[in-house]
Amino acid sequence: MAQSAEQASEAADAAMMAEVRQEVHKEAFPPFDSSNFVPLFFWLGISFLLLYFLMSRLALPRIGGILHNRKEKLRTDMQEAIALHAQAKEAAALQEKTIAEAKAKAVALAQENQAKLRAESDARQKQVESELAAKLDAAETRIAEMKASAMSNVTAIAQEAAGAIFQQFVGKAPDTKKLTAALKAKA
Amino acid sequence: MATAHPIDPIHQFHVDRIVPLHFLGADVSFTNASVFMLVIVAVATLLMLIGSFNHKMVPGRLQSIAEVTYEFIASTLELSSGREGMRFFPFVFSIFMFVFLANLIGIIPYTFTVTSQLAVTFGLAMIVIGTVVIYGIIKHGSHFFGLFAPSGVSPILLPFMILIEVISFISRPISLSIRLFANMLAGHITLVVMGGFVAGLLAAGSFFTIVAPLPLLMVVIFLAFELLVAFLQAYVFTILTCVYLNDAVHPGH
């Protein structure tokens, strides 16, 4: 009785063990479970083809286009900037040249003006000087004339006075010729 | 043991058949993995299309992301396989987007990490190697197999060299797929185990409750690390794809 119960429990144990073993077997490590391989391959194939198609036909050309456009824009902008820079340099050089020319012109003009002014003032000075000299000459001749006339008047006055004095002393009019000769000899 | 819910770190890798489908006797059921593969395609497409929607000269945030990704992959490809390799640009871009978004979306809790399935990473690796072999043979014919015979090797050594080259070529898809798969698997198991520690310690009560934030801190650190791994593994996958494609474009050493 006890033996048969033991046997029964042993049999039950064995059955349980087998079941557990089977379960363990069924529960193989999933990544190595070969029954999964075919569906995984199949869906990998489908998804990868789909991804490849979407990337190569749709996504990548768009991104590539954006990148290409940007590169082109940068290139053209850069070229433009370089051209503008060269233009600006040219303009600056031109301006410098113009300034230098204007400066040279201004200096020349100033020198010319200075020379002209100097010449003018020189001429005016000379003219004034010559005028003054002429006036001086005229004055001198007048002075000489006046002196001469004064001197001749003095002779006449002296002769008259001498005549009057002679008449007072002698009582008769003196000889004009003798008087004149005497005065001349005295002078 | 009876009260605490055992947190199964493997559960997140279960492939659940949402709609069982059969096509020509093959099981092509629509699974949770299929859902996330389509999510990846949708996210990638929306990102690139919305990013390029406005055609702005000065890009906004989304446009910047799209443009930076574009230029990043373009420069990576051009650097390793030159101008002629640029014909593969959409292909390499799709590979990068698929792996990167799969890794990135997988970090979000309750999502399914497509790249933690060996079948998926091996499938991706076979797509890459298949492209290399088919393009190489179409473009260069039998000359493509010069890839296995390095020039300037003495005739005695040549058989060994060819053997080594063939083995190295065959191991490429294996290393490519296992690297990505193992990285994602290990990272996600670590995250769940650490998260399980937090729950377990909290449930244990008393002293254990106090130390429960420690594994939580670890979860935060590992999440940041996983973010790095997500990008890094996608980049490694992409750059190796570029290197292998270079063999198809310029075979012979």
Image: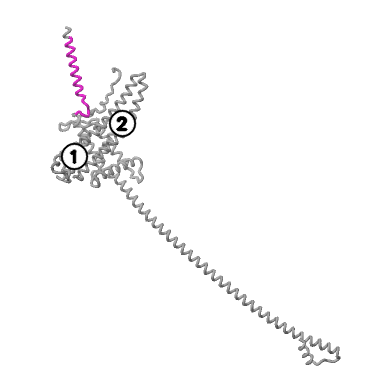
Where residue A96 sits, quadrant-wise, is bottom left
Q: Nearer the viewer, residue A161 or A91?
A: A161
The kind of residue on which mark 2 rests is Ile
Position of residue A177 in the picture relative to residue A103 (left or right): right
Q: Is A175 displayed left or right of B46 in the figure?
A: right
Where are the magenta residues, as a range? A5-33
Q: Quick one: A38 or B68, which is closer to the camera? A: B68
| Amino acid of disc 1 | Gly
Q: Please give the residue where the numbered disc 2 appears in the rendered image.
A: B108
Residue for badge 1: B130
Magenta-colored stretch includes residue A20: yes
User: Considering the numbered disc 1 on the image, is that residue within a helix, a strand or a loop?
Assistant: helix
Expressed as whole percent of the image width and height from the top left, the position of residue B177 reads 22, 34
* In the displayed structure image, the side of residue B250 where residue A177 appears, left or right: right
Question: Can you say whether B170 is above or below A136 in the image?
Answer: above
Expressed as whole percent of the image width and height from the top left, the position of residue A177 reads 78, 92
In the displayed structure, B213 sits above or below B24; it is above
Magenta stretch mostly in which secondary structure? helix
Query: Which subunit holds the residue at mark 1?
Result: B
- Residue B9 falls in which quadrant of the image? top left
Q: In which quadrant of the rendered image does the N terminus of chain A lie?
A: top left
Specify the quadrant that holds the C terminus of chain A: bottom right
Q: Label 2 vs label 1: CA separation?
A: 32 Å
Rendered view: B158 above or below B5: below
Res. A179 image quadrant = bottom right
Q: Earlier in the sequence, mark 2 or mark 1?
A: 2
* Closer to the camera in the image, A142 or B60: A142
Which chain is home to disc 2?
A: B
The residue positioned 58% from the left and 74% from the top of the image is A123
User: Residue at the location (28% across, 30% down)?
Assistant: B187
Task: Tell me residue B13's x, y (percent).
Answer: 25, 28
